[in-house]
Every structure is written in C-alpha cells, then in structure tokens.
C-alpha cells in the first residue's frame, strides 16, 4: 500500500521551538515582571511538573494567582505567543522536503500538543500552511500524545488508513505512541534532547538527524519508496 499522508508534529519537528519550551519558566516569569529565584528552574519545571503542578508552584513560590488551570494555561500561552509570532524559525531543509512530498501528491497535516491558535502564529507566518490540509491539537481530541487519538483522528481527517500514513515526531514518548498505533514513524533528532536518539532509533521505522537525510539519499524518491515497502 502506498504512502498517501504524512502527519507532522510541530515543535521540534517543523519548527525549532524546543529551546523556548525548555525555557518556559523564565519566559513566563519575565512576562509577569519576575525573575527565577533559583538556578535550574527551567529544567525543573519542564521535566518534573504537570500543568496543574506548575500552577500550584508559581502561586506558592511567586504569588501569581489563577482561578483554575485553564486561566494559568492562558497566561503561559500569552507569554510564549510572541515567540511563535516573531522569533521561532523552521527546522533546516524542512520546506525542501514538504515541496517534494506535495509534488508527489502526498497530503499532509500538523498534529500538535500546542494550542492551535498559538501554533498557527508560526505556521502561517513561516508559510507552512500552503502544504498542510489542517492543524489538529491535543485539546481537539481531549487527551495528550501518550494516547494515539490525535494521530488516528488526523489520519481519519486526511481520509487514509493508518497503514497509508507516516508520522514524524521528535519526542520519544510521542513516537512510541505512533509506533504502537501501527504508523510508519519517522523520528527526527532533537538537539535539546540528545539522550532520546538511541531509544528513538530502536523503535522508529526510520530515524533522521535532519531533513537533509531524506534529501541526500541515492534518489529523492527513496524515502517514499521505503515507507511504501514498509507498509506492504
């Protein structure tokens, strides 16, 4: 069965934004006119805290008050939206690959954990939407990427089966979800998480250090042929 659709993650896969997310605590505090009280706060928040835990932490340690988790989420998106709108740039060579895929008639979409409204600030500014059928976020399906719902819904909206779609992801836990759901899964190296390279290589259908890996092969058709062969 031929490869007909590609489902792309956004952060770290289409756009180079993971540094921003890993600096979220400092960015969020600055948006509120504050500075971190401790070294390593960004890593602590990024790696150890859920959304609700972040809300409780900033309320207790910095006196920032929010009536509920949604209002806290609204506040941190307020802090990061300017980065999507003005700062964040594409992953190198991604547009070369998107053009190749579109020329081959492959339909593409974005499936992201980032709120659609925020994601679109970068996707529209940088020109991604000329290649994408739609953008879907985890809020649309009610669960995060530890569940396959967002990938399954994306494939459904594209009009294809799981075996006709590839998923591109930069995070191990997301790639694992896609693999377990039966997708041909392409892992892409994330410079902010080098420790994930080996486990990603072990589970993904294909692993790349960057899009140039898909463009410098013996033939520009080789990725699409290998993805097709995998699904037979």
Image (cartoon, rainbow, N blue to C red):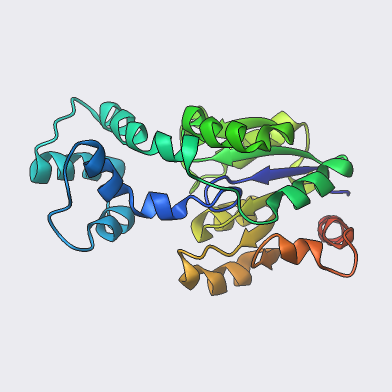
Judging depth in this view, the residue of 128 and 197 nearest the camera is: 128
Q: How many numbered dots are placed on residues in this image? A: 0
Residue, far front: 86
Q: Which residue sits at x=32%, y=54%?
A: 46
Where does the image place residue 28, in percent across and percent down from the top left?
27, 42
Which residue appears at 68% of the width and 58% of the height?
A: 186
Q: Position of residue 146 (x, y in %)?
A: 48, 49
Q: Describe residue 169's horizontal placement relative to residue 194 as left or right.
A: right
Q: Quadrant of the C terminus?
A: bottom right
Confirm whether residue 74 shows in the render.
yes
The answer to which of 29 and 148 lies nearer the viewer is 29
Residue 199: x, y in percent?
54, 71
Q: Give the image quarter of residue 19.
A: bottom left
| Residue shown at 30% from the left, 41% from the top | 51
Relative to 145, say whether 141 is above or below: above
- Pick the front one: 220 or 161: 220
Residue drawn at (61%, 52%) of the image: 178
| Picture quadrant where residue 82 is located | top left
Observer able to see residue 183: no
Relative placement, left or right, of 82 versus 66 is right
């Amino acid at each position: 069965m031929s490869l007909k659709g590609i489902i792309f993650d956004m952060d770290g896969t289409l756009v180079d934004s993971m540094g921003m997310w890993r600096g979220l605590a400092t960015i969020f505090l600055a948006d509120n006119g504050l500075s971190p009280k401790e070294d390593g706060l960004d890593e602590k928040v990024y790696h150890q805290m859920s959304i609700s835990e972040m809300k409780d932490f900033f309320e207790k340690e910095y006196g920032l008050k929010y009536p509920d988790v949604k209002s806290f989420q609204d506040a941190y998106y307020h802090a990061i939206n300017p980065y999507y709108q003005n700062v964040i740039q594409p992953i190198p060579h991604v547009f070369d690959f998107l053009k190749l895929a579109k020329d081959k008639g492959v339909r593409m979409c974005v499936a992201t954990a980032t709120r659609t409204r925020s994601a679109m600030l970068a996707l529209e500014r940088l020109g991604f939407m000329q290649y994408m059928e739609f953008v879907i976020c985890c809020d649309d399906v009610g669960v995060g990427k530890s569940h396959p719902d967002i990938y399954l819904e994306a494939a459904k909206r594209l009009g294809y089966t799981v075996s006709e779609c590839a998923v591109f992801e930069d995070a191990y836990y997301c790639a694992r979800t896609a693999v377990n759901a039966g997708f041909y899964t392409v892992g892409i190296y994330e410079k902010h998480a080098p420790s994930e390279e080996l486990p990603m290589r072990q589970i993904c259908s294909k692993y790349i250090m960057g899009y140039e890996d898909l463009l410098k092969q013996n033939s520009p058709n080789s990725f699409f042929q290998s993805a097709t062969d995998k699904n037979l």
